[in-house]
Every structure is written in C-alpha cells, then in structure tokens.
Image (spheres, grey):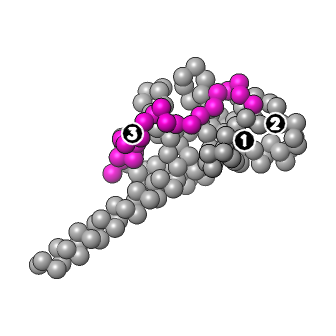
Amino acid sequence: MNIATLTETRSSSDIISVTVDQSVGTAIALLASKRIGALPVMSEGKVAGIFSERDVIYRLAHEGESCLTRPIGEVMTSPAITTTRDTPILDALSLMTKRRIRHLPVVDGETMCGFISIGDLVKARLDEIQHEAEAMREYIQTA
C-alpha cells in the first residue's frame, strides 16, 4: 500500500494551509480552530515549510508573545520534508520516525497534492494488518 491509497479520496483543495506572509498568531488560531497539529506553509504555489505546534512552543519559549506578530516565513520549519504518492506507507512511517516529524506534505513535482499525518499512516497500516489477519482466518477455516 502506498500514499496514493490515503490521498485518492481527498481533494487537494481541502488542505488547510497558510502562506509565508501570514502571522504566527493567525496560524495558531487556525491550528486551534481546526484542532490540527501542523500546517503546510505555501509560497508561490509551492511548499515552503511546515508550521507546527512544536514551532509555536519553541518560539514562545525563546521570544514570548512578541513572536505572534511575526510572519510564518520567519519561524516555520524549512525546508519541508516531503513525500510522493508512490511512496510505500512503511517507507513514509520510517522517514517520519527517523526525522522525528508527524506530518508530511505529499507532492507531485513541486505541487502539493496531499498532507498526511503519522496517525493517517498508522491507521492505514493497522487496517491493512487487520485485513490480512481476516483473510488468513478465512483461509484457515476453509482449508
């Protein structure tokens, strides 16, 4: 199973993102209102970086509330680590574990076509394992 399996039913227009010139405060409000942990940061139609809860914590710890008016482009994690639709789910999980990240933009060339979380990948893998176990049980019962 690959990333395309996860993103095929999702529309890229449904991806919640921010631009490099929006403020940190605006991004925090978006994270809170949508109850999400990270946002892809866009510049000229391309993924410029990621803004996550971790970025908020680090900036608040180092700068205090003055960081809230800064543009996202100055505080985001950049460059963004990305993946493609044809990446196997286990490879994406491995990448996220090694890099200690929880979100990946899915790109086709330089165009973002999806945004996945480690939770999406774990759920897909568990579903796959459950399906395989069910198939094995059925095979054993009919043999």
Residue 75 at what x, y percent from top left? 74, 35
Q: Residue at x 46, y 49 (%)?
A: 92
Three-letter amino acid code at the position of disc 1: Ile
Q: Is residue 29 left or right of residue 142?
A: right
Label 2: state its secondary structure.
Answer: helix
Q: Position of residue 138 (x, y in %)?
A: 19, 74
Q: Residue 93 versus residue 36: which sits nearer the camera?
A: 36
Please name whichever residue, 68 or 103, is drawn nearer the observer in this view of the structure. 68
Residue 31: x %, y % from top left: 66, 44
Where is mark 3, residue-wise?
85
Q: CA distance from mark 1 to mark 3?
A: 28 Å
Q: Earlier in the sequence, mark 2 or mark 3?
A: 2
**Residues drawn in magenta:** 1-23
Query: In the picture, residue 137 is in which quadrant?
Result: bottom left
Question: In the drawing, what numbered circle is on residue 28?
Answer: 1
- Indicate the secondary structure of the residue bearing disc 3: loop
Q: Amino acid at mark 3?
A: Arg
Q: Nearer the viewer, mark 2 or mark 3?
A: 2
Q: Are marks 1 and 3 in contact (CB under 8 Å)?
A: no
Q: Which mark is residue 68?
A: 2
Q: Position of residue 115 (x, y in %)?
A: 50, 41
Disc on the earlier residue, 1 or 2? 1
